[in-house]
Each structure stands twice: as structure tokens, then as C-alpha cells.
Amino acid sequence: MSNYFYVTTSLPYVNGEPHLGHAMEFIMADVLARRARQRGDKVIFSTGTDEHGGKIAEKAAEMKITPKELADQMEAQFRKLTDTLKISNDRFIRTTDRGHEQRAQLIWRALEKDIYKGKYSGWYCTGDEAFFTEAEVKANKGVCPNHNRPFEKVEEENYFFKLSKYTIQIRKSIESGDFSVIPETRRNEILSILKDGLEDISVSRPKDKINWGVPVPGDPGQVMYVWFEALMNYITVLGYPENEDFKFFWPATVQVVGKDIARFHAAIWPGMLLGLGLALPRKLYIHGFINVDGKKMSKSLGNYVAPHEIIEKYGAEAFRYYFLRHIPSYNDGDFSWQHFEAAYNNELADELGNTVQRTIVMIQRYQEGVVGDIPGASHDIAQYEAAIDNCRFDRALDEVWEQVRGLNQYIEEEKPWEIAKTDDKDHLREVLAYQAGALLEIAGLLEPFMPETAAKIQAVFKDGIVHPAKET
RNA sequence: GGCGGCGUAGCUCAGUUGGUUAGAGCACAGGACUCAUAAGCCUGGGGUCAGUGGUUCAAGUCCACUCGCCGCUACCA
């Protein structure tokens, strides 16, 4: 009997081009999905794009195109990134998909017992699609620091969701570990928010203000607040409420999100699920941000690096490797061309690539390319597995490299080139077969992280006869 | 203001419930070798573990305070 494994990324909002953070989130979720498939789990890995909201409408207006046209353009870019990064997602949902919109309305209906109409008065930033407190507005002198535009005073009638009533239930789920939030510092932050109690949230906007959204059922004057509606994708993509996929794959095994949207996923989304009478996700993994040369990446600072720049130069495999191993899985991390190149040369080419190469050459030279019986995996991978379970991708790769390093040490110790000078053919065959076996084991561990590299190594050694292949 | 975290070799970090001369990788220096993508292997230098004061037979590891960072959150107004 196999397990059902459902992993999601957050949906990038299509107001900007794909950046390193999106790319990293894709590959992290991809590792989880690939590892689960490797284990034989039934997997659904879903990602997509979030396309509604005032900010999209506004930007489209500036560009003199329709919101849908803008969304189409951006969606194509995100889809392209998942392709070039070899992301193995099974689904790609757009919040403008007909099915999502219809199901979102069903969800609204199902939540209506917790929805009431109220007056909202506050400061709003279209850039954030969010309201801000009086204090925040004052602290920033009336200008949103994220978008450098004035907050708007908004007073309007809209719908509220009774998030407050679920505070205790959410808190208990997190504390008990039924709903696991990692890393622990993020968990602590969420718990401290819950300790103060959640407030009811506004979940709609008047249609005359923002009409690029999903209509509230039964009230043509209102559209759903984009965040409220976007979060629903995690179940609409499974075909909530009637589809079999939903029945088998919910609750999600892991949801991967960035630290900036932790609150939406650790408080609001769980509240919605509880309102629907559904189980909470089993795990929420919150990753950090990527800096460049130690500074926050920004176009104005001139240190902006787009994913495709790196991929074009070094390839998707190296990209995946760097962002999984050298960006701390539980922290913010740093990208620099210098560091990237060092990792590329020292770790990928010299340590891994060269080990494969020297093994190939020896087998060809000493044994005409015949390996013979290759021993199976011999290392304890408990640490590696635990690391992946905990989304410690950096640690998992450290474990793999322990094996690479160990294999090089083994080769130096056995000195197959010395054995080749003697008549001890059996010993030589044994040593070289061990090398091939160790490389196959490494390839297996590498597959979720660098699928093409793993496949290349496997292709070389798999059937006992070395097939020369180009290595990275 | 409240809550949480951090400050360990030049850099990035690990250090389990306090217990012998504090660790790894990178960087740097030296060495032996040659199968290999001048890659790989071995050895070494380098740290008042932010500071001060405590608890203890014993503290990087516990307590208090100080300094410096960071995150979340709140508010005075």
C-alpha cells in the first residue's frame, strides 16, 4: 500500500517576473516530490500562478492591456521557468482557471456560516493588497515602504471571515504537531501571533473598486479578496469538493512557502480549512530570502540577478545544486557569482565529476569497460532521509557529499592503478566494482536534487559495462 | 514596549541532557602520489567560544546583567 503525498508551492503573484526566490521554492518542492515518487508514493505536486487582484488590474491598465492578457504573459514566464528548472509538477493551476473560480465560489458558500457583512475602515496599499494599522501608517509617514506609494484611506462595506473563532484550534494543532510548522523559529513566531488571538479578516472588496476577481456568490456588488481566494487553490486544484484526488490527497503532506507569507499559510488558511471542516496540512515549511553579495536584491541597487542569467551560464542542474545546498534551508542565504563558481568548480566538477571520470577511465583501461557484478548500496542514509523529511535540503546534500568524499578517499587508499600492475585481477575487479556501486548509490541520492546528473551516472554504470558519457 | 533568536577559526556554520587538549567545510601553507576534468589524497597554522559577574568538582553548554545584530508583534500617540 503506497502513501499519498501532496506537495504545493505558493502561487507566485503575476505582477512581476520570476525571481530567484520563486526558483528556489520550485526546486525545494520538486525535491520533496521526486523523493516521494522514488519511495513509491502516489504524488501530486502542484504549483501555478495567482492572477487576480487590484494590483494586476492596475498594472495591466498602465500597460494598456487587459488583466487577463497580462496574466497570460506572466504565466508563460513562470511556466517556462518550471520547464528549464526541470520541475516535475503534476499540476499548474491558474487562479483564473474556470474550475478554480467555480470551486472558489463553492468554498465561499461552504464558509458562509462564518462570513458576515461589516464596515471596514482603514489604510490600504494596493501594492500589498492589504490593510495596514494606524500605527504602521504613521510609522512610515503615510507612505507604504514596500511600494513607495501613499496608503489610501478606505472605508467600505465588505464581508468578514470569523477567523478569530479558530485561533485556539489552530494553536493546538501547531502545538501538538498535527500541523507541523518548520523551522522552529517560524513556529514560535506563529504561536506568538496566535497567543494574542487572531482577528476577523476582511475577505471581499466592493466591485466598483476592484473588479478583477472572483464574484462573491449571491452579491454581485462584491468580489473576493485576492488572498482569500488564492489560498483556496490548494484544494480547488485537487477538485474540491467532489473529486477523488481531493479525497485521497488532502490534507497536503507539505506546503512550501516563503517567510513573507507565513502568516497567510499558518493562520488564515488553516482557519479557512477549519471552517470547511477539513484537516490542516501536515507540514508547513517556511524558507527564507536570498540576498545577493550580502545585500537585499533589488533592481535599484543594481545587484539584481534573474534566474535565467545563472541557468544560461551554468545550467539547471548546477542552479538546483547551489540553491539547495548553499542557501541554508532554515535561513536567509546569499548568492554571489564567486561563491557559485567555486561550488560549481570544486564540488560539482572536481569532486563529483572527476570521481566519475577517473572511475570510468580505470574500468575502460584495466578491464575493457567491463565492471562485472556491482555491489548494492552500503551506506546508512538515515541522516539523509531525516534531512529531507525536515526540509533540510542543505544537510541532505552535505550527507551525499560525505559519500563523494569518502569514495575519493577509498580510491586513494586502494590505489587501483597499483593493483593493476600486479596479477591480482580479482582484487582489482572488486575495487572498481565497489567504486561503480558507490557512484550508483550517490546517483540515487542525488536524483531528487539533480535528476539529470543522476541519470547520467546511472546510464554509465547501470548494466555492468561502462558507457562513456559526457559528464558535467 | 512585548515575545523569539543570534553573536564559536579570515568566511559559512556544527557543537546532543554542562565532563578529558573546542569541531567541519571553504580559504591559506606545506607534503606525498598519478587512475582522473592540473582534479583527488595527506598534514599543518589559525579561536581569552561577544563582555562581565555568578552556580558547580567541572560551562561554548546553566543563571543574571551589559554590548551588538536580526525576526515577529504591539503601542504610546
Image (spheres, coloured by chain):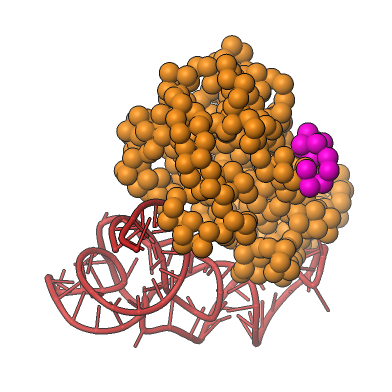
Chain colours: A orange, B red
Q: Residue at x 60, y 25 (%)?
A: A221
Tell which of A336 and A11 is nearer to you: A11
Regarding residue A78, the answer to whether it shows in the image is yes
Q: Residue at x 51, y 40 (%)?
A: A155
Q: Residue at x 62, y 46 (%)?
A: A126
Residue A380 position (above or below residue A213): below
Tell which of A187 and A210 is nearer to you: A210
Q: Is residue A329 left or right of residue A437?
A: left
Q: Which range is magenta?
A: A61-71
Inspect the magenta stretch and tell me whether residue A144 lies in it.
Answer: no
Q: Is residue A23 left or right of residue B45?
A: right
Residue A255 position (above or below residue A347): above
Q: Residue at x 75, y 49 (%)?
A: A17
Q: Residue A124: x, y in percent?
A: 55, 47
Tell me the quarter of the image containing the N terminus of chain A. Answer: top right
Q: Residue A186: x, y in percent?
A: 44, 49
Residue A68 position (above or below residue A242): below
Tell which of A298 and A154 is nearer to you: A154
Q: Residue A297: x, y in percent?
A: 66, 63
User: What type of secondary structure mainly makes up the magenta span?
Assistant: helix
